[in-house]
Image: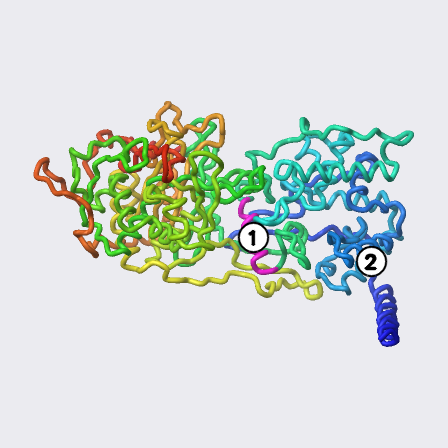
Amino acid sequence: MLIAGFAVFIMLAGIGVVGFTYYSTTVVLPNEVPLPLSTTIYAQDNKTQLAKLGDENRTFVTINDIPKHVQDAVAAAEDRNFYDHSGVDYKGITRAAWNNLTGGEKQGASTITQQYARNAYENLKDDTYARKVKEAILASKLNDKYDKPTIMQHYLNVIYFGRGAYGIEAAALTYFNTRTKDLDVAQAAVLAALIKQPVASTDPNGHKGYDPAVNPAEAEKRWTYVLDGMVTKGWLNAPGKPQRPTVYPTKSLQKPKDGGAGFGVKTPRGNVVNYVREEMEGWGLCTNSNAPGKPSCVNELRDGGYRIQTTIDPKRQAAAENAAQRKKGSEIFPEPKNLMAAVVSVEPKTGRVLAYYGGDSGADFDYAGKNIDSGGNLTGGHPPGSSFKVYTLAAAINAGISVKSHWDASPFKPEGFDNPVQNAGRDVSKTCGKWCTLEYSTIQSYNVPFYHVSEKIQPSKIVDMAKAAGITTMWTTPPKGSSEPVNLLKTKGEDVAPEPFFHVVGYGQYPVTVLEHANGLATLANHGVYNKAHFVIKVQQQNRDTGKWEVVPGTGEKRNPKQTIRPEVADEVTGVLKQIPRPNNRSLDNGRQAAGKTGTWEYGGDAKTNAHAWMVGYTEQLATAVWVGSKDSKKPKILDRNGNNIGGSKLPGAIWQRYMDDALDGKDRIEMPSVTGIGDQNAGNGIETAPPPVPDQGQPQDCGPFGWLCPQDGNQGPGTPPGPGRGNGGTGGGLLPTLSPRPRE
């Protein structure tokens, strides 16, 4: 066995020598080291540029403007023998191999020169032994061609530091609001510590990265590691050298804008980049969670040289931004500055996201989707309030309950609640009282009947229906402690309801994202056929030999439509919802039919003030969800410029109406289904009474010519699941006291 093993070793060594000689004689070093190829992301027309990655937020600096202690900090973090080796650290390779062989923490042995070579040359992206040999040869040739300061300059101008910052100059400004030449030792060590992993893994069990705003403990631990290395190498605490800092530079460290620390570009369309990154990982092109053998998705997007066609429609994206972004002429522009809007629009028949506005920068908090907060927790949902009743209504119809069934809408106090479940302060005794149809209750957005519906069919059925429509994540709202995300794809409704999702799920207490709510509406608009919301149509790379752009194998749009809700159920919901926009003064232009639903959730336990307001709705061509809330934690209440409470049909309704009119301009007007009354009309708990006269149950109440005669909507805030300390269950999201839409500028 020893002889055979020795023979194999000799053979492999011989092959290695041949291969080494082959690569060393055929790989030619370019006259100039190329920068990584940028990736361009286009809209659906494949012409309108949404983002160009690789030169976004990058300012080049020469080595003369990079202090020696900054260079030394980077070397201490990434390659402590940088100034000693010839481009390849053979001692480091041996040490890493031994550590990996003996079961220690997995280590790499790439030098700064090798890392730069890998970033600079497209053919060094794969994870093969041939690549590693070629990388080593190129690194050696780079080392022969350039001096160490030049290699360090190239490296520091292309590396990604997180928060949308490429290169050391952008990183210095992003993290410390200063220039590279003015960085002190402590700040330099923070930036050097980021390089290993600047962005948190999207895997909940993965590493959170070294951004101090996301993972402060690990960030400071690696900061200490960098400083230890600088001391060991004699770059600190030595004659003529700076002294080692003792305090982490928290005071000068800039917080991520709006609390986010995502990867993207600093434009309103930057959040699209983050979804592209997720889809690339899904195709196996890269990893967001440090999976072995795959390149980082951040690096791939930054310098992979891709041309990516997205689903974003330029016209509709512009319409969303014109309506919701804080700029002159928008609906939100004259309103208080703490107010924030988010808009997502999905094409029902394909699942394509046609417009997405979740904020002004993809490197900040995304108000329309999911985020990782400073504690590494998944956040991003907003309580949908009465807009969530679309799924409760669908679940009821699916369970055989007719929208013509009658329900008791009288306020009552469930066991364990501190306050009764109410109906936006409206006196139902003057309308339908204990004999309200489910149809009328939806239009008026009474809460009490929906609580009773949840009791009858069980909240698990509502959760399952929301999941079938497209809701994959809901957040709990405990009276005490932090909110927790629940992945509905990994559980059944019966496992999460009634605990933690109690009967209040029936009228929208538990947060969801704007994106997934829009996806759910798209399923209803598409007669119950679900198409997963997605952002990418095609991914291409340029063939270096022919110059042609070729589709990357295994990528691109893959539609998989599924009938997740029975068509008669979805159409019956539509028949009810199409009666809502008109009395809320949110009818679309030219008599175009549209389904709609308002919703609010109040601030804390204050029934008079809202913290979240929604308007959602759809036609057969387009499903759109609009949310309005506060981006200022010190001013969580949402009040308009006149100090009035904002309800669903007010600012959210104005944004939704304006966007839908602009987005559908010139499109066919399609007739929507009407109510049929399918199901059991005797399924409700209503009690018929003689007086007072009951109005037509299928029509909304008369709010007067300007809508002033109906009370305002509003739902209670988070914190009322089963158990003591219950609130009153919210105050609905029905017909609102709205003025006619104000003239557009």
User: Residue drawn at (27%, 59%), measured in percent from left and top?
Assistant: 568
Asked whether 380 falls inside the magenta stretch, the response is no
Tag 1: Cα neighbours inside 10 Å, few (<14), some, or many (≥20)? Answer: some
In the structure shown, which secondary structural element does the residue marked by tag 1 occupy? helix
Residue 400 percent across, percent down from the top left: 24, 56
User: Between marks 2 and 1, how big is the CA–CA gap?
Assistant: 31 Å
Colour basis: rainbow
Q: What secondary structure do most residues of the magenta stretch adopt? A: helix
Residue range (magenta): 271-284
Quadrant of the image occupied by residue 696: top left
> On the rendered structure, is 579 left or right of 646?
left
> On the rendered structure, is 565 left or right of 442?
right
Of all residues, the one furthest to the right in this rendering is 239
Q: Which kind of residue does numbered mark 2 sit on?
A: Ala
Residue 292 percent across, percent down from the top left: 67, 57
User: Residue drawn at (86%, 31%), measured in percent from left and top?
Assistant: 237
Residue 357 visible here: no
Q: Between 287 and 222, which is closer to the camera in this rendering?
A: 222
Q: Which kind of residue does numbered mark 1 sit on?
A: Glu
